[in-house]
Image (cartoon, grey):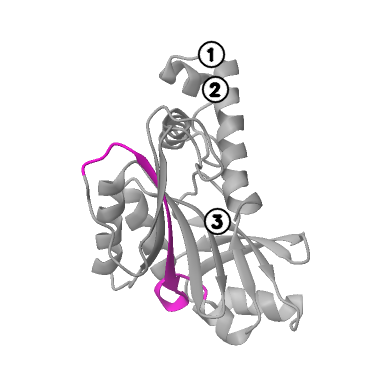
Amino acid sequence: MSNSTQAVGQATPQSPISTDASSTRLTLSAAEFALAEIFERVSDARVMLEPAVANPDDHALVVVRTEGHGRDTLERALEADSTVAGVEAFGAYEEGWRYRVTWTGRARQVIQRLLTEDVMLLNAEGNSDRWKLRLLSPDRSALSHAYDALEEIGCTPECRSITSVDSGSEPSAYTPMTAQQYETLITAFEMGYYDIPRSATSDEVANHLGITHQALSERFRRAYENLVRTEFILK
């Protein structure tokens, strides 16, 4: 097993020849990504995009927490934000409120550019005027291309760390998932398994990968477990 974490500060990621999946943490300003107007109107708001291996580029589930403002104020700010085309309230959730937001403008543009480079937004947390993003890429080259794509649309991403996952490695405290688990999730995403409604069933994904339904379920379970461990337990 080989696992390495590289602190890179604000440096632009390089593109060594590699076939390793990479998990990356970077920051963007709210003005460059999403909900800048929320943070202006509700200064103590904390927003979390719910962890997802595959989010469509036009919507996300978010949890918003605030101690100094009421729900009505928060929802008015959400509806007025220029990066939000629609809001659906799901009720109270862990000392906050849960919503399904439909992205437009810069937020959608950022996510589209990431997906175009085969880089997936696993989760994001925003407060004040800055977002912390967690990305998953098939290799360092895709990450570098995504970084360049963000700069092309006027973003100034600050890369904080890059964690490599060697093919065939087993999960560790700092490894989000094995390359096999990553392939399974990417395949499921590309086939539309995470779409609403789904465009592919679990049986169809398993058949495409040439594995049994039970093996697919096990890969999903272990991949989700590793993501939860790195995103919440060891964060």
Q: Position of residue 102 (x, y in %)?
A: 53, 61
Q: Position of residue 178 (x, y in %)?
A: 46, 33
* Within-10-Å neighbours for mark 3: few <14, some 14–19, many 20+: some
How many numbered discs sit on the rendered protein?
Answer: 3
- Which numbered mark, 3 or 1, is in the foreground of this view? 1
List the residue tagged with mark 2: 216
Range drawn in magenta = 17-35
Q: Which residue is painted at 64% across and 52% down in the image?
A: 232
Give the residue type that dot 3 points to.
Ala
Say which element carries label 1.
Answer: loop
Q: Are marks 3 and 1 in contact (CB under 8 Å)?
A: no
Residue type at tag 1 = Thr
* In this view, 59 is above or below 87: above
Instruction: State the residue at coordinates (51%, 80%).
Output: 129
Gap in Å between the C-alphas at discs 1 and 2?
6 Å
- Identity, as a three-letter code, of the amino acid under mark 2: Leu
- The quadrant of the picture occupied by the N terminus is top left
Tell me, yes or no, whether the highlighted magenta stretch contains residue 120: no
Q: Assess whether residue 25 is covered by the magenta stretch.
A: yes
Helix, strand, or loop for circle 2? helix
Q: Which mark is residue 212?
A: 1
N-term-proximal mark, 2 vs 3: 3
Rendered-image quadrant of the C terminus = bottom right
Circles 1 and 2 in contact, beta carbons < 8 Å: yes
Q: Which residue is mark 3?
A: 60
Q: CA distance from mark 3 to mark 1?
A: 30 Å
Q: Give 31 or 220, whichever is nearer the viewer.
A: 220
